[in-house]
Structure formats: structure tokens, C-alpha cells
Amino acid sequence: MKKNGFILFVGIFIFAACSKGKIFEQRQEFPNYTWNRLKPLIFEIPINDIKSEYNVHFTCRHITQYPYDDLKTNLTIYSPEGEERTTVHTFKVKDAEGKFLGEGAGDLWDLKLLVKENMSFNKAGTYKFQIDNLMDYYDVVGLMDFGVIVEKVSPKKEKD
């Protein structure tokens, strides 16, 4: 009986250690593998610990038929009080020789892009992340889904 309890404890510890930093992960799928330029993606992210810093990543899954070298996006973060911050981000999808970047399996490719490093949140609450398609085309084809990952990285550093 003691052996089973120990194994359970170790299993819980390993699981907690592996998922320790990630506080949010969500993807939104595109109908017909197409992201319409006029349809922004909205993610609502609860932030409870304002004493920590966070890394924010975008994720993108596309098929081999994605025709462009990159994917341009706009990130607007709305605080619980309605303040907003906007930044532009570009995914490099292909290298200079036209080969896909990221991890591939068959016709599927996964990319992950760090967009905010050691980011601080001033107030606890729900933050709205709006991601806009900034490509020059009305419909961007070849995209399966797009997502956001938020990871807690460390407590905020004290200012001198």
C-alpha cells in the first residue's frame, strides 16, 4: 500500500513539474483552412498572479499548401480596465530557400513564436487578446489553426 502511495505522489509531482508554468493554451480552427482578414481571433486569458512575469507565444498550424513566406499579425491586449496595447508580429513560415520552418509531419506544420517575453500584468482579471490578420489578402489559405500560450516564468524582479 505504501508503494502505491509513493508512486502516486511521484506521478503527481512529475505532472505538476511538467505543466508548472503554462497557465493558458487555446487554439482556434479556421473553416476551410482559411483565415478571413476581417475576422479577428479573440482569446480571454485570466491573470490572477500579478507578482509574476509571463511569456506569451503564438502557435500556428498550417498545411504544405500555405503559399506565403510569412504570416503578419497584429496583437492588441485589452486590460480588465479597457487599456490597450498593440504590437505587430511576423511569423517566418519559410526560410530563404523556401523550405518550411517549424515541426512537420506529412502535410502538417507547427510553428511557435515568442511574442512577449517577461511580460507583466498590473491588475488581476481577464485580459482580452485580439489577433488580427495583417496579410495583404482578403482570405489567407492553408491555415488550420492559430493559438496563444501564456506561461508563468518567474516572480517580478524588484526595482531598486
Image (cartoon, rainbow, N blue to C red):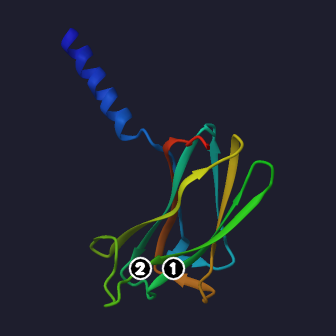
Relative to 31, residue 140 above or below: below
- Residue at which label 2 appears: 93
Q: Pinpoint residue 21: horizontal percent, then vertical percent.
A: 45, 42
Residue at horizontal 36 percent and vertical 81 percent from the top: 64
Mark 1: which amino acid?
Leu
Q: Is residue 27 visible?
A: no
| Towards the viewer: 22 or 39 | 22
Residue at horizontal 70 percent and vertical 42 percent from the top: 125
- Badge 1 vs badge 2, beta-carbon distance below 8 Å: yes
Relative to 20, residue 142 above or below: below
Judge from the rendering whether residue 147 lies leftward or rightward of residue 3; answer left or right: right
Mark 2: which amino acid?
Val
Relative to 114, residue 123 above or below: above
Judge from the rendering whether residue 22 lies leftward or rightward of residue 7; answer left or right: right
Label ID, residue 120:
none
- For the residue labelled by badge 1, is the local secondary structure a helix, a strand or a loop? strand
Dividing the picture into quadrants, the one containing residue 130 is: bottom right
- Residue at which label 1 appears: 71
